[in-house]
Amino acid sequence: MNLLLCLVCIMLIPLASAGLGLIHQGLGRSRSAAHAMLATLCALGASAIVFVAIGVSWTGVAGGAAHTFVGGGAHWNWLGAGPFFPNWVDLDPADPAGFSRALTLCLEMFAVGLAAIVPLSAGTDRWRLAPICIASAGLAGIVFPLFAHWVWGGGWLAQLETNFGVPGFIDAGGAGVIQVVGGLMAVSVAWVLGPRRGKFAADGLPAAIPGHNIVLVLFGCLLALVGWIGLDSASSILFYGAGPQQVVWVVINAVLSASAGCLAALVITRTRYRKPDASLSANGWIAGLVAGSASCAFVTPVVAIDIGVIAGVLVTYMIEVAELRLQVDDPGGAVSVHAGAGLWGLIAVGLFGHFSAGTRGGHILAQLVGVAALLGFMLPLIYGGNLLLDRFVPYRVDNDGDWQGMDIRELGAGAYPEFVVHADEFVPR
Amino acid sequence: MRLVGCLLLVSGFFLVLAALVLFPAPAMRIAFVAAGLGVEALGVALLTRAHTLLQKEQQ
């Protein structure tokens, strides 16, 4: 029963990818709209193929084969050791264990696609298609499997209790495994690419480059909600043994945290700018979903609202700081929404989660160890990988592409050829 | 500067791992984990600063 419910939930997850695709397409310029959606498909495709071929082996499953070593009196389970290309016998749907493994593979395949889409938002209007595919493949083949194994595959973060007497790190909906990993990829990509031409003046002040279609962005938020409900529910069932009754609360919590995040961002922008900002409110909605996903199966609805409110407030200020102070050109706010809110969500599990075992201090400590692993190990790995890849396959489009837009430069045709006229596309410079 | 930032990030992570291995007492553990996170925060700040300066040079 639970596994069939899980299968239904997994089938909803692609809607989250569609939602995020629409959001970063709408927040980019019209001259790069078709490129943005094609990049979404390419990232999904490359990550799915590489994950099923290689990544699934290193992600592993709890209790399955793994690479371990002994150090400091502890067994460090650091990488899965399953076979490359999943064996159909191991995934036999007639066998409950095989069916569960097949569902895990399916969920993780969609999850890695979601993580691969996140950085597209930070690289909007300037990230070329070829490096997008290769970076997505790298994410699916190396980066995601490593952290997913540590958390969902029975790795050392999940086994903190066995080794150190600290409760295991908890990430029910993938706030760390998917969102923070994607967000760290986004900040690395933004750093490697640099800002869009004309974004920052010589004195460092940013120019406003508004998104071209806010309706698509808001529709993307609605799609993302459905996908997130599926993601949170399926991962809670598969990795934390949630039953149907608990899944109902997962759904309610997801809706509440998203709503609270959106309304908090709306109130903040209304108070500060006199009118509510639609794109920041959309970011607040996604930030609520991201932050709420880590604790979706372990908190009450009131706490889910609190987590969403803090995420919504946090994200509005983080986006401003990233742009004004740190000069990070992140058109879709991916760094703040996915990395920032994701880290907050992980800490919130320790602060507010209800667990049958372990002390409050122990849970907070476990979550902080997970956060430290993300910042101290995954960020250098992701950043170094992107710098290295940029040497071989330049990430950034050339100067002409910057002005013409990615559609004309890379695809040879615009997304809206009959409706949009650009004044500066073909002006010689 | 970017390299130092990355090294600080990794150092902070190993400080956290060392806290888990070396200190069974919860108070010491939390203190060292917090210290490790502090070192990581410095690493993030340094990386960010490095990119801001790099961007200004390019402008």
Image (cartoon, rainbow, N blue to C red):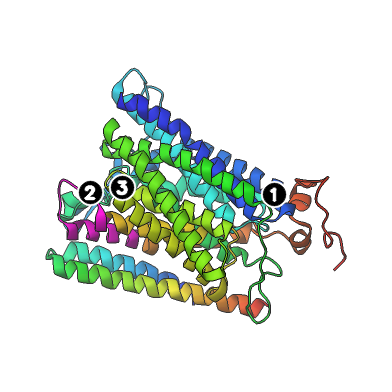
> Depth check: A355 or A192 in front?
A355
**Spot occupied by residue A263 in the image (x, y as percentages of width and height):** 46, 56
Mark 2 vs mark 1, CA separation in Å: 44 Å
Which amino acid does the dot numbered 3 rest on?
Pro
Q: Is residue A413 above or below residue A361?
A: above
- Whether residue B44 is visible here, answered yes or no, is yes
Rendered residue at 62%/63% (across/down): A193
Report the Cα–Cα distance between label 3 and label 2. 28 Å
Q: Position of residue A416 (x, y in %)?
A: 77, 46
Residue farthest to the bottom, as pictured? A203
Which quadrant of the structure image shows residue A248? top left
Residue A27 lies left or right of residue A319; in this view the side is right
Q: What amino acid is at disc 1? A: Ala
Instruction: Find numbered disc 2 in the image and state the secondary structure of the residue it sits on.
Output: loop
Label 3, on which residue?
A301
Helix, strand or loop for disc 1: helix
Q: Which residue is mark 2?
A: A159
Chain on which label 2 sits: A
What's the residue at 36%, 27% (across, down)? Answer: A5
* The N terminus of chain A sits in image quarter: top left
Residue extent of the magenta highlight: A350-374
Mark 3 vs mark 2: which is more N-terminal? 2
Callout 1 and callout 3 share a chain? yes
Sequence-first tag of 1 and 3: 1
Q: Which residue is mark 1?
A: A33
